[in-house]
Amino acid sequence: MRQRPLFPRWSNSLVATLVVAVVVLLVGLPVLLMVFQRTPLVTGRARPVAQPIAFDHRHHVGDDGIDCRYCHDLFVRAPTAGMPTTARCLGCHAQIWNESPLLDALWQSRTEGRPIAWVRVHRLPDFVYFDHSAHVNHGVGCVSCHGRVDRMARIEQFAPLSMGWCLDCHRNPAPRLRPQSRITDLVWRPPPGQERGLASALMLAYDVRSLTRCTTCHR
């Protein structure tokens, strides 16, 4: 008499399916997590941020031609770029649009003697050290990290600010460099045919090196 198998025939297919599912889970889950970490849901990229005062960069920068340095006056000499103070804003708006309800928060700031509660847009992890002055004084322009702010009604994060994105520049900084006179120029491009020569000259002038040691950013 033929002996009946201990397990039904379909159990072979079940075991094979389970093995494949476990392998896919072990490999696929980490990959999915790494991909998710790079999406705008996590990085905050391309997400316009509302501010206590509706400051439109398209108007102030694009139409009026206000230079980055006027509002962000620390970025050439400090790790942070600096944010416009109440007094700096009132330097213009005490005379211009001074009765606009859009500026109520500005007048309230002056009356109460407290700074404007600007909302931070670009944020790096606490374990990452970034110095604006080190980058700007070595030829990295504002547009490289912040994008075309003259086209933004509300400022949004232009770059992913990921480790890989930073390392791309640190490994090959030459194409990102520009003369100091063009640091805040959002539309500047190297003269045609001079890209490589100018980049090499700026690397030498600024004493820029390819810095990829961990301690450069993690201190």
Image (cartoon, rainbow, N blue to C red):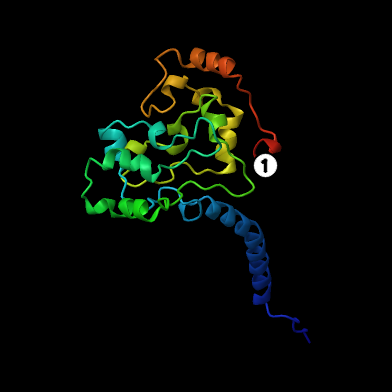
Q: How many marks?
A: 1
Residue at x-position 40% and y-position 52%: 113
Residue 204 picture location, percent across and down: 59, 15
Q: In the rendering, at what x and y percent does residue 118 appear?
A: 42, 50
Identify which residue is drawn at 57% across, 19% down: 206
Residue 120 located left or right of residue 94: right
Residues 48 and 66: in front is 66
Spot occupied by residue 21 in the image (x, y as percentages of width and height): 63, 65
Q: Nearer the viewer, residue 11 or 218?
A: 218
In the rendered view, would you say 111 is above or below 138? below
Occupied quadrant, residue 83: top left
Comparing 78 with 49, the one in front is 78
Residue type for callout 1: His
Q: Is residue 30 visible?
A: yes
**Quick one: quadrant of the C terminus?**
top right
Q: Residue at x 66, y 33 (%)?
A: 212
What is the secondary structure assignment of the residue under circle 1? loop
146, 106: nearer the viewer: 106
* Residue 106 in picture, x, y percent from top left: 32, 50
Q: Kindly tell me whether residue 52 is visible in this rendering.
A: no
Say which quadrant the N terminus sits in: bottom right
Dot 1 alpha-carbon crowd within 10 angstroms: few under 14, some 14 to 19, many 20 or more: few
In the image, residue 32 sits, relative to residue 84, either above or below, namely: below
* Residue at the disc numbered 1: 218
